[in-house]
Amino acid sequence: MKLLTTVAATILLTLPILAFAGQVNINTADAETISAELNGIGLSKAKAIVEYRKKHGPFKTVDDLSLVKGIGERTVEKNRKDIQVSDAKK
C-alpha cells in the first residue's frame, strides 16, 4: 500500500511539470530552453541546434531540425507540436 501511495504521489507531483511544457521557438531559444522543452533533446543536442542555427541561419520549417547532426525525423515528429520556427528577427 505504501508503494502505491508513493507512486501516486510521484505522478501527481510530476503532472504540473508535464502540463507546463510549452512551445519553443528553435530560432530564438537558448540551448537550456530547448533541452528543457523538447523530449529527447538533451543539452548537448540543444547546443548543436543553436550552433547549426548560428552557422546556417534560422530554420525555415520544423522539418529542417532534422538537418542537425544527432536529430532524427523521429525526434522531430515526437516534438512537432511544441516546435515553432517563426522569424528570429521578430
Image (cartoon, grey):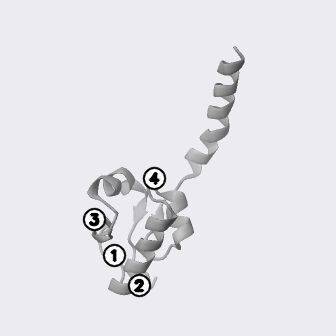
10 Å crowding of disc 2: few (<14), some (14-19), many (20+): few
Q: Which residue is disc 1 drawn over?
A: 59
Left or right of 48? Residue 62 is left
Residue wearing tag 3? 63
Residue drawn at x 52%, y 71% is 31
Q: Which is in the foreground here, disc 2 or disc 1? A: 2
N-terminal-most mark, 2 or 1: 2
Q: Nearer the viewer, mark 4 or mark 1?
A: 4
In x, y percent, where is residue 12?
65, 33
Task: Identify the amino acid type marked 2.
Answer: Lys
Whole-angstrom CA distance, mark 2 to mark 1, is: 10 Å
Quarter-of-image position of residue 50: bottom left
Q: Is residue 37 above or below residue 56?
A: above
Residue drawn at (49%, 60%) of the image: 42
Q: Earlier in the sequence, mark 4 or mark 1?
A: 4
**How packed is label 4: few (under 14 Cα within 10 Å), some, or many (20 or more)?**
some
Mark 3 vs mark 4: give the one in front: 4
Real-space Cα separation, disc 3 to disc 2, in angstroms:
17 Å
User: Label 1's element?
Assistant: loop
Where is residue 40? Give x, y as percent.
Answer: 43, 53
Res 76 quadrant in image: bottom left
